[in-house]
């Protein structure tokens, strides 16, 4: 299968690309290698498979329609996975335009290219941040998500809505996946596992927001990759129960799906820090701070729908995942 993966130099895109190559797919990877965080880490991720005979890399920006179209024309992908995005909640407070450029303009460009290229299935990354201040636990795709509390979340919600439009108008099968705090080897330096590991080893103080009381549905990277591939292999179908004679507001006849993809077992931030301390063999100094604007208190994914439809069953306990993350961290940063 010819699969185009965007954001291949990123944390999830690189892990996914490795898995697709390992099972025999041809992959075209696209990334603009931006400097939101250490470009050397992005390059090192791509170097893992950059020389693979079934891998092609294009360093282009999704917002550049001409370059994107050229990449599509040359490769003619059958399926597409969009992992490229300007990520991060806090950065969106200072850099709103970067989010619109990558997550809105870039995403529309990708939808257009998929539509004209006759792509069989587009799987794209959304985020648990679309749930905003929702307090109904666990988070379900049946919950209303009309009140995003960061621009990042607003652009991710916009992607879900625009995907629906393309599924409806052009019958483009799309599957949106709302990721919940992904962690593991080759992770992101702007996210708490890396930030905390780095500071603990340097003996620096950790800024722990919301006094460490919030919980996150930390999800191990290998579980995420397996779930994405399961979805990719099962294109969305029109809802068989949909009755066009009796349309209802929350139902759609389009080949459009939207799922949570998390672990389904939230962990308190303080517990996560304890596990890091244990595996790093160092105690953390903590600066307990109030909640930040745009942050959400707790996240917890209801993953029953993804289990029912594609058999998704995350299997990595947090204790094992943190141990593997620390092992990788120590080998990648031997002098830390
Ligand atoms: P990441 O930042 O590591 O990867 C994103 C990649 O996309 C980067 O390599 C970046 O250079 C590239 N990129 C950004 N804008 C681009 C553009 N306009 N054109 C081409 N490339 C571009 O992030 P990640 O953690 O791998 O996340 C992958 C996806 O999952 C993103 O859409 C993110 O919003 C979403 N997500 C991630 C998490 C998580 O916990 N990691 C949680 C929720 C949602």
Image (cartoon, rainbow, N blue to C red):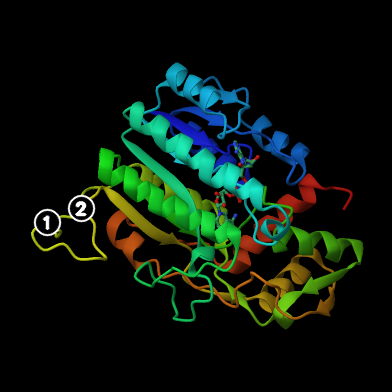
Q: Which residue is mark 2?
A: 253
* Residue at figure coordinates x 45%, y 80% from the top left: 137
Residue 255 x %, y %:
26, 47
- Residue 312 at least partly seen: no
Q: First in sequence, mark 2 or 1: give its number.
A: 1
* Residue at figure coordinates x 43%, y 18% from the top left: 73
Residue 209 x %, y %:
73, 76
Residue 17 x %, y %:
53, 36
**Mark 1 packing: few (<14 Cα in 10 Å), some, or many (20+)?**
few
**Residue found at the very far left of the displayed protein:** 245
Instruction: Identify the secondary structure beneath mark 1.
Output: loop
Q: In the rendered structure, find residue 320 and report the number of the disc placed on it.
A: none
Residue 208 x %, y %:
76, 75
Left or right: 313 in relation to 185: left
Q: CA distance from mark 2 to mark 1?
A: 8 Å
Q: Which residue is mark 1?
A: 244
Give residue 143's quadrant in the image.
bottom left
**Residue found at the very far right of the displayed protein:** 203
**Mark 2 packing: few (<14 Cα in 10 Å), some, or many (20+)?**
some
Judging depth in this view, the residue of 310 and 287 nearest the camera is 287
Instruction: Identify the secondary structure beneath mark 2.
Output: loop
Left or right: 212 in relation to 24: right
Q: Report the quarter where the N terminus lies.
A: top left
Residues under numbered marks 2 and 1 in contact, where contact means CB atoms less than 8 Å apart:
yes
* Residue at figure coordinates x 58%, y 47% from the top left: 100
Judging depth in this view, the residue of 62 and 303 nearest the camera is 62
Residue 309 lies, with reference to residue 274, above or below; the image says: above
Give residue 305's quadrant in the image.
bottom left
* Residue at figure coordinates x 16%, y 62% from the top left: 247
């Amino acid at each position: 299968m010819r699969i185009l993966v965007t954001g291949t130099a990123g944390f999830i895109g690189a892990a996914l690309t490795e898995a697709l190559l390992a099972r025999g797919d041809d992959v075209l990877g696209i990334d603009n290698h931006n400097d939101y965080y250490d470009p050397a880490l992005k390059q090192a991720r791509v170097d893992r498979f950059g020389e693979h005979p079934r891998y092609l890399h294009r360093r282009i920006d999704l917002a550049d329609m001409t370059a994107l179209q050229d990449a599509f024309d040359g490769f003619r992908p059958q399926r597409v996975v969009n992992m490229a995005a300007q990520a991060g909640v806090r950065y969106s407070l200072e850099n709103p335009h970067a989010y619109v450029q990558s997550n809105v303009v870039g995403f529309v460009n990708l939808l257009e290219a998929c539509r004209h290229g006759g792509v069989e299935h587009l799987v794209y990354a959304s985020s648990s941040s679309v749930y905003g201040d929702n307090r109904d636990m666990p988070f379900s795709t049946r919950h209303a998500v009309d009140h995003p509390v960061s621009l990042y979340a607003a652009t991710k919600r916009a992607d879900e809505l625009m995907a629906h439009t393309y599924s409806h108008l052009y019958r483009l099968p799309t599957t949106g996946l709302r990721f919940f705090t992904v962690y593991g080897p080759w992770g992101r330096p702007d996210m708490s596992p890396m930030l905390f590991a780095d500071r603990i080893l340097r003996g620096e103080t950790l800024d722990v927001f919301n006094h460490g009381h919030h919980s996150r549905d930390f999800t191990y990277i290998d579980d995420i990759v397996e779930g994405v591939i399961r979805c990719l292999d099962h294109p969305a179908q029109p809802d068989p129960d949909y009755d066009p004679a009796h349309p209802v507001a929350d139902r759609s006849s389009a080949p459009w799906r939207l799922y949570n993809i998390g672990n389904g077992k939230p962990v308190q931030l303080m517990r996560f820090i304890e596990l890091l301390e244990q595996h790093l063999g160092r105690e953390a100094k903590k600066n307990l701070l109030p909640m930040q604007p745009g942050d959400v208190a707790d996240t917890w994914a209801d993953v029953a729908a993804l289990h029912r439809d594609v058999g998704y069953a995350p299997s990595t306990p947090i204790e094992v995942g943190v141990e593997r993350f620390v092992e990788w961290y120590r080998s990648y940063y031997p002098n830390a």
